[in-house]
Image (tube, helix red, strand yellow):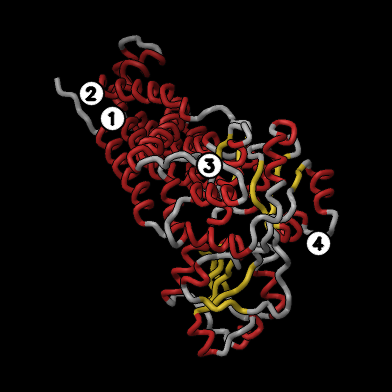
Amino acid sequence: MRRAYKLMVVAVVALTFVLTSAFAPRESVVVGSKLFTEAVILGEVATLLAASNGAEAVHRRQLGGTRVLWNALLNGDIDVYAEYTGTLYEEILQTNPSPQLAATLRDSLGVEMTGPLGFNNTYALGVRAESARNLGLSAISDLSAHPELRFGFSNEFVDRNDGWPLLRSAYRLPQQARGMDHDLAYRGLAAGDIDVMDLYTTDAEIAYYNIAVLEDDARVFPTYNAIYVFRADLATRAPAFVDALRALSGTIPESLMVSMNRSVKIDGESESMVAQRYLASIGIAVDAGEERSRLARIALRTREHLVLVGISLFFAILVSIPLGIWAARSPRVGVVILGLVGVLYTIPSLALLAFMIPLIGIGGPPAMVALFLYSLLPIVRNTHAGLTGIAPRLSESAEALGLSAFEKLRHVELPLSARSIVAGIKTAAVINVGTATLGALIGAGGYGQPILTGIRLDDVGLILEGAVPAALLALLVQGLFSIKRYH
């Protein structure tokens, strides 16, 4: 049994060092995108454009909402992403529209912007066409007469300065709103689970689900012209790409953006192919490359997932076992240690990941730190329980043999506690496999990436592409830790 435990620890160490190569060095151009389809398409446009102008580029998809992308840009974790002028005024700068926007960004924040791409993707509210007819709804102000209506808004819209708080105040709406994923809200509206949702006016689903767009009769929502924002130093590192990015201004009318969104969301085309076709239409030949097969994608995500789990678990073992020993040796200190790791474990995983972004950035490292923190409790607790559960007579016998404290720990106490310690490691490993799927929200990859994309595109196959391997990996990890050696 003891040999099996040692073999498992050695395997974790070996796995850690072999798989760290999955995280490549920082590329010359890192493109980010928000969670919704249009942002991903525009991110692919920038990525292909960078590659066509001689820059090594990577696209970190679906990183989150506005604040996540903006902070990542300021911190240098990404170099460029698609943004909207109204968002910059209302959410980022919290100021009135001004013709000096570009100068303000450059002089105060070291951020440059392109000219408008050609379309205004503003907010709107939508209801089912049938509801609009039956209730006589044509404008947002009409909603105040129907307090029974259920509002379901995207999570970011619920809290944004230019979102629900502004809307509720301007129109004196009596309803309460619940936050939900934007793509799921469309399905909820179509199914009758909610009555009103927020829209992006270039969403392809508006026509697909026959949604009536309510007039913003109080003119609450500002203009949201699409632009690219990028770090000022990018003009030095990739000048040809920046020139090409600026040249995109005015080349995407609203009808074209709606069509591109439809090609991805409704027709099932990939964002890269849609981006390639758009660039070709304006005379820029790029090669999006062949799409990976499902098996190749699973292999890539498996490697990324194993890196996240392997590294975080390895360092958790290194830290947790000594902490568990210390907690067992000193009861007063033990109360503090067990209390602290217990508190860490109660922090919601999404909140912990968000907390890591300003400290470490995006990608694999913050996800691994979060997984490391979640791994501490089961290993520390089981180490403590194993050591304190040893019969006193066995400890006394070791002392009678003249063993030092270290010798007693090494030859008597740890072997007797091994089963409990390994059980804690197994628990941590299985939990990490599942929790690591959330790492995709901050660009860490892994099985969470196809799950997020599948939710966004309403593609059950993509969701299963991430969920099934994650479940199988959890079962495999549990099975490996359950292997017994018989002598």
Mark 1 and mark 4 lie on one chain; the one further toward the N terminus is: 4
Q: Contact (CB < 8 A) between labels 4 and 2?
A: no
Give the residue pinned by disc 4. Answer: 97
Give the residue pinned by disc 3. Answer: 443
Give the residue pinned by disc 2. Answer: 1
Q: Where is residue 303 in the image (x, y as percent from the top left)?
A: 40, 33
* Picture residue at 64% right of the left edge, 47% below the top: 81
- The kind of secondary structure element at disc 3 is loop
Hey, what amino acid is under mark 1?
Answer: Arg
Q: State the CA–CA distance, disc 3 to disc 2.
A: 39 Å
Give the residue pinned by disc 1. Answer: 419
Mark 3 and mark 1 lie on one chain; the one further toward the N terminus is: 1
Mark 4 and mark 2 lie on one chain; the one further toward the N terminus is: 2
Residue 41's place in the image compared with 298, above or below, is below
Q: Which of marks 1 and 2 is in front?
A: 2
Residue 31 visible in the shown view: yes
Mark 3 and mark 2 lie on one chain; the one further toward the N terminus is: 2
Mark 3 and mark 4 lie on one chain; the one further toward the N terminus is: 4
- The kind of secondary structure element at disc 4 is loop
- The kind of secondary structure element at disc 2 is loop
